[in-house]
Amino acid sequence: MGDWTVELLKLGQITGPAVIGLFGVVVGAGLTSRRERNAEARKAKKDAALLAAIIGGELDKFISSCADVAQDDGTVDPTSGFWDESTAVPSFDPSKFAVEWRSIDEKIMFDIHDLPYQIGFSNGAISDAAEHDSPPDFPDWFEERQYQYARLGLHCVDIVARLRTAAKLRPRPKTFEWKPEVIFQAKIDKIEAQRAKRDQAELV
């Protein structure tokens, strides 16, 4: 009961049937409040599952494109003799999706919305590498493209895993599983080893 009801009881201003009536009102209000909370919880769960399905699927596409870039050694343009990329870099814009962002963990939400910045940063690093590179094969530019998109892809693999776990989605059947993180980590390790070797050679 509310404090005002207790005070009235103490003063003897409500008795008998009135007390029973007030008790029923209080209990009814409590049950209604519980039903509303349960309904809100069910809605939040459904919103989170829908968000994880939609955004997880879109991130899977982004991850697949990152894997393509991370493995792109380019092709020779027969006209110029210069090497060109054979895959375009992907983009991801979370603002275009009509989902309930507040239904998921704040850290996951931030990481997803931070992706455009991360992509911009990566593209900036790739552009910097291109400015100091030399034709016809542009080795530094290709290396930086592969490195940056392997890094982005690995980051997104982690986001998707956390997103789906938080939404309690069932894992995909084994038939549809693939391991892009293996591709990304192998590429990162290879490039970092090459860079360490070059740095060591410059010190000699």
Image (cartoon, rainbow, N blue to C red):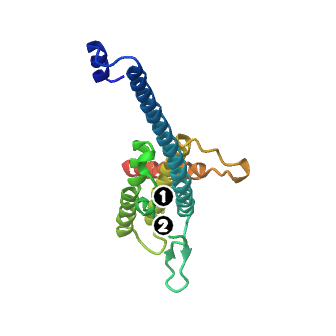
Find residue 106 and report its horizontal and vertical position in percent: 39, 43
Amino acid found under the numbered disc labelled 1? Tyr
Upstream in sequence: badge 1 or badge 2: 2
Q: Nearer the viewer, residue 1 or 38?
A: 1
Which residue is the site of mark 2?
89
Q: Nearer the viewer, residue 14 or 55?
A: 14
User: How busy is the neighbourhood of tag 2: few (under 14 within 10 Å), some, or many (20 plus)?
Assistant: some
Find residue 74 and report its horizontal and vertical position in percent: 54, 70
- Quadrant location of the N terminus? top left
Q: Residue 149 carries which label?
A: 1
Q: In this view, does 100 lie above or below 77?
A: above
Find residue 8 and report its horizontal and vertical position in percent: 28, 19
Residue drawn 39% across and 20% down?
19
User: SS class of the residue under badge 2?
Assistant: loop
Amino acid found under the numbered disc labelled 2? Val
Q: Is residue 165 above or below residue 127?
A: above
What residue occupies the far right of the structure in this picture?
A: 175
Q: Do the residues labelled 1 and 2 touch (CB within 8 Å)?
A: yes
Q: Which of 69 and 120 is in front in this view?
A: 120
User: SS class of the residue under badge 1?
Assistant: helix
Find residue 142 and report its horizontal and vertical position in percent: 48, 65
